[in-house]
Amino acid sequence: MEFVFAAGQAQLAAADHLLVVATKSAFGPRERGKAAIARWLPPDLVPLALQLGAEAQPGLLAGASTSRTANGKRLTVGVLADERSRHASPAGAEGIRKLVAGSGLGGKAAVLLVLDHSDHVLAAVNAIGRALPTFTRKSTTKAAGTLAIACTLANGTAVTPTATEIDVVARARFAATLVDTPPTELDPAAFAAVAKKALRSLRGVRVREIAGDALLRAKLGGIHAVGRCARSAPRLLIAQAGPQKGTHVALVGKGITYDTGGLHIKARGAMETMKSDMGGAAAMLGAFLVLARQKPAHRLSLLLCMAENAIGPAAYKPDDILTLHSGKTVEINNTDAEGRLLLADGCSYAARELGASIVLDAATLTGAQGVATGDLHAAVVANDEAIEQALLVAGRATGDLCWPLPFAPEFYRSEFASPIADMRNSVKNRSNAQSSCAAEFVHWHLDGTKVRWGHVDLAFPAFRGDRGTGFGVALFAAAVRALARG
């Protein structure tokens, strides 16, 4: 479904299905949202919209009432709870997503968002994008329709998304489409080709690739080992933008295009949906595209670590010892803990070869992330408090929510103890802060670099209801802008 932004009442009136979203108080005794509804809706729909809004019950999140109008068109009014917890999005983004996803919008449709504050527009529109994924192969699918979106404050004042905010939402939907693409169609080579096409459409972006056995010559033993037996060779795709001066921010994404678990193969039920294991790379690609289009005043790098964790005669094995880019050796005790091997190589390369001063990585890294922070909050681990705070603030502003986990190398490195190598790649105690431990494995490979580092485990937020969400694009675009200013 294509998004267009409505400039006036006519575009909403032309819709076959109109969804109005506002807080419950907008339809209360004072009808706080009446001015907005009266400005944007045809006069004959205003009383019905106010009535439906008064009838809808949001509970703690959101609820809706719907009706068919006299001319056969459909009007749905969704109400958001008036209060949100301090760890939720102030814009009520998840409530908006729920209302849009459940409304059955299709064909010629429109949404009127009555916002509490003009700063909420990005999170609100990002939520709409998340509710309406684009990828489908259903044989009965009709031609994609158009969704007209209007944003207004309660007093009727229009709020128009900026060009950058519109780009963020478009790139997030692009990232979600990549995650939803079947893995045989989006193997490492195909993923790299899609990324290069998108990157080369932007002026001033420099792109190069290290693939196959060239990874070994570049000392990227982790990426090579994980993907070396797949039909499509593993690779590190590197893109750079901006001047060769100032703060240098590197975005590193885990791009496992399919994860069988390797020789520690996943069971049936655990392997399905593992096309989503490149959600971190998709998010970083989207964020880089947004930031590079703005012609950053600082140096910006993108590193997509791509591999298929396949099985075959050449597969890396339990008990193998790998030498990663950091020079540290890793004894393999779990071939299904492969993402951290890619990230360790990518982060080390960003710091040591590219000279990044800030390294941010994103990955669908651990199932334990969902246990620790749930379906909606990604987990943040950082060696720098300013980076941690930048991610938390950006998450609440964009609707890509985050929550911090402990950063404590002295508590977690012992979990990886090996008698014959610098470390193993999987913990001995799976009940000891698994997500923090996995992050620490990556951080360990930055020893001696003095970079500021932040890690986001987005395993659950990036793939919900068996669909990609585009989570992370808005988050990292906002966080990088804040860190570059600081």
Image (cartoon, rainbow, N blue to C red):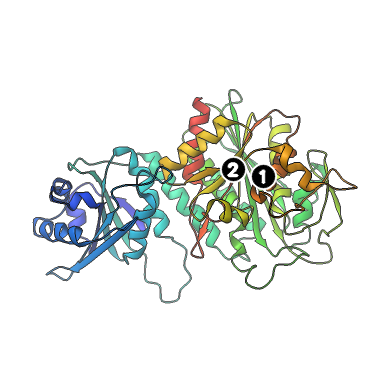
Dots 2 and 1: beta carbons under 8 Å?
Answer: yes
- The residue sitting at 64% across, 38% down in the picture is 407
Q: Which residue is mark 1?
A: 439
- The residue sitting at 61% across, 69% down in the picture is 272
Q: In the drawing, does residue 324 fall left or right of residue 479?
A: right
Amino acid on which disc 2 is placed: Leu
State whether residue 482 is above or below residue 233: above
Q: Quadrant of residue 47?
A: bottom left
- The residue sitting at 78% across, 44% down in the picture is 414
Callout 2: 10 Å neighbours few (<14), some, many (20+)?
Answer: many
Q: Which residue is mark 2?
A: 405
**Whole-number angstrom distance, CA of label 2 to CA of label 1:** 10 Å
Q: Position of residue 363 (x, y in %)?
A: 61, 49
Callout 1: 10 Å neighbours few (<14), some, many (20+)?
Answer: many
Q: In the drawing, does residue 132 fall left or right of residue 290?
A: left
Q: In the drawing, does residue 205 fall left or right of residue 68?
A: right
State whether residue 223 is above or below residue 52: above
What SS does tag 2 mark?
loop
State whether residue 479 is above or below residue 322: above
**Residue at the far top in the pictured view:** 246
State whether residue 63 is above or below residue 212: below
Q: Quadrant of residue 209?
A: top right
Between residue 386 and residue 475, name the one nearer to us.
Answer: 386
Between residue 53 and residue 240, name the one nearer to us.
Answer: 53
Label 2 or label 1, whichever comes before in sequence order: 2
Residue 140 makes an appearance in the image: yes
Q: Position of residue 128 (x, y in %)?
A: 37, 54
Q: Position of residue 235 (x, y in %)?
A: 71, 50
Residue 348 makes an appearance in the image: no
**Residue at the far bottom in the pictured view:** 140
Amino acid on which disc 1 is placed: Ala
The N terminus appears in which quarter of the rendering?
Answer: bottom left
